[in-house]
């Protein structure tokens, strides 16, 4: 069993721990049970959640027992951490549906086969739903000094602004009770989370100490930022989700492929299982041959395979190559082609009939019809990877891919599309 803390420190993912020396000793003494929770605040996890989920996965690979908790109860309440306004409450039906979807995502990263490291998946609704208000106040609430709760950053920040409802104020008590329940039911002694969860997690550590006179541990992962100042895990269209229906595998792959040279090595450490030697080689490649983007390709391929599978990666790579004239567009399935064209300039037209020059201008690949004509004259205009030499050419139904799409290209690297609605 390797030293998982050394691994996490090298990967530079640890933000806070309650007592790293005590945790190191507990890990050395034998397998421990560790959990991380994921609230259903959306129908899918996003790449920010993935950072925590991969830390949990690393603990399992190091020989420890993981528990994935989906917040069927806490998802009904809402965590005030990191928010300046009250969270809108979703209906119980919506939360239940999102719990089911997120359970499936968490399951993909953990191993449930029988053995000493077999994973467990739970919902905190299992023990919270049966908890009466009186029991909640008498058995749990009495262990939470209000002055300490008010001092927590997530609470004090809200009190200084728009205020905080009792519902969200109670969130930290519910999460603390989760830790207590998992300690009692499964012997869990370590909770993981993002750095914004520190107050909630240490509330659980405190509760277990008060109720069970036991010493347990907390570890949070660092907030991931981007070197250019933009928000990590965001694209022009919004968050980068793990659900392929919300972020297509093609868009997911392109997000990592476009990682900044200043970020890519850090992302390799956080999001892949490559060894130190492999990552150091890729770091060297970034320094010596940045244009080759070997590190970005490794990152994109590893993560797309991890989240969406090897078959989806193969389709994504084929689409990426075909769009730029290095493969057959006709061999791409409709869903993959549609996903790829969603990431480039595209115009929707009601029917065919316009000339290629008109369509090139409508797609946004050129600023005007005269620029489109110039591209044709200079030999840099393509339709479905076939060079267009006739300025008056009018695409027909035979040119449509899957009966809907035309792929336009100007030069070697500027791609756009037309969709016939």
Image: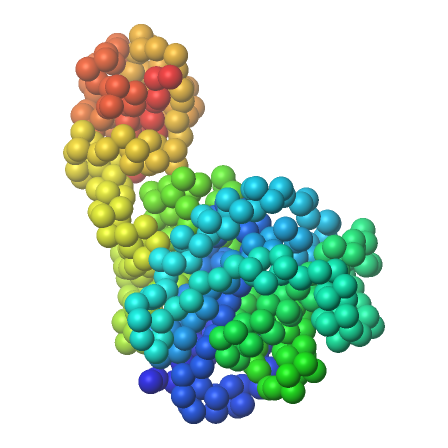
Is 365 displayed left or right of 384 in the figure? right
Q: In terms of image quadrants, where is residue 180?
A: bottom right
The image's colour scheme reads rainbow
The one nearer the camera, 67 or 353, is 67
Indicate the quadrant containing the N terminus: top left, top right, bottom left or bottom right.
bottom left
Where is 200 relative to 404, above or below? below
Picture coordinates of residue 48, whole percent (x, y): 50, 57
Where is 222 relative to 227, above or below? below
The one nearer the camera, 248 or 169, is 169
Is residue 290 visible in the rendered image? The answer is no
Which residue is painted at 63% across and 65% down in the image? 175
Is 192 displayed left or right of 280 in the figure? right
Picture coordinates of residue 69, whole percent (x, y): 50, 62
Q: In terms of image quadrants, where is residue 219?
A: bottom right
Picture coordinates of residue 150, whole percent (x, y): 80, 68
Is 87 displayed left or right of 189 in the figure? right
Is residue 131 visible in the rendered image? The answer is yes
The one nearer the camera, 161 or 78, is 78
Which residue is painted at 51% across and 55% down in the image? 232
The furthest residue to the top: 353
Picture coordinates of residue 332, whole percent (x, y): 22, 34
Indicate the quadrant containing the C terminus: top left, top right, bottom left or bottom right.
top left
Which residue is painted at 32% across and 50% down in the image? 308
Which residue is painted at 28% across and 52% down in the image? 309
Where is 362 relative to 135, above or below? above
Numbered marks: total: 0
């Amino acid at each position: 069993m390797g030293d998982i803390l050394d691994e996490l420190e090298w990967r530079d993912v640890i933000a806070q721990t309650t007592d790293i020396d005590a945790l190191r000793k507990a890990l050395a003494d034998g397998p421990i049970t560790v959990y991380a929770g994921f609230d259903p605040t959306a129908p899918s996890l996003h790449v920010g959640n993935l950072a925590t989920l991969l830390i949990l996965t690393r603990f399992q690979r190091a020989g420890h027992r993981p528990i994935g908790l989906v917040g069927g109860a806490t998802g009904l309440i809402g965590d005030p951490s990191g928010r300046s306004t009250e969270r809108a409450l979703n209906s119980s039906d919506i939360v239940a549906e999102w719990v089911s979807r997120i359970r499936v995502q968490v399951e993909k990263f953990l191993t449930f086969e029988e053995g000493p490291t077999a994973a467990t998946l739970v919902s905190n609704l299992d023990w919270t739903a049966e908890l009466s208000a009186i029991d909640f106040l008498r058995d749990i609430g009495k262990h939470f000094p209000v002055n300490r709760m008010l001092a927590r950053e997530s609470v004090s920040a809200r009190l200084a602004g728009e205020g905080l409802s009792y519902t969200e104020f109670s969130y930290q008590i519910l999460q603390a009770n989760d830790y207590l329940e998992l300690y009692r039911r499964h012997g869990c002694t370590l909770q993981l989370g993002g750095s914004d969860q520190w107050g909630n997690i240490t509330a659980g550590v405190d509760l277990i100490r008060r109720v069970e006179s036991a010493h347990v541990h907390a570890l949070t992962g660092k907030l991931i930022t981007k070197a250019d100042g933009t928000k990590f895990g965001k694209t022009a269209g919004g968050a980068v989700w793990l659900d392929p229906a919300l972020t297509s595998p093609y868009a997911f792959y392109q997000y990592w492929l476009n990682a900044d040279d200043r970020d890519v090595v850090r992302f390799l450490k956080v999001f892949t299982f490559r060894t130190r030697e492999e990552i150091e080689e890729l770091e060297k490649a970034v320094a010596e041959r940045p244009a080759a983007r070997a590190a970005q390709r490794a990152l994109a391929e590893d993560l797309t395979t991890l989240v969406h599978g090897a078959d989806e990666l193969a389709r994504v790579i084929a689409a990426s190559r075909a769009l730029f004239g290095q493969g057959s567009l006709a061999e791409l399935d409709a869903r993959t082609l549609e996903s790829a064209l969603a990431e480039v300039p595209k115009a929707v037209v009601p029917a065919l009939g316009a000339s290629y020059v008109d369509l090139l201008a409508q797609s946004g690949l050129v600023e005007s019809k005269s620029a489109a004509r110039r591209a044709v004259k200079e030999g840099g205009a393509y339709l479905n990877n076939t060079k267009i030499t006739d300025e008056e050419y009018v695409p027909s139904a035979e040119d449509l891919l899957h009966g809907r799409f035309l792929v336009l290209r100007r030069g070697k690297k500027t791609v756009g599309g037309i969709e016939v609605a």
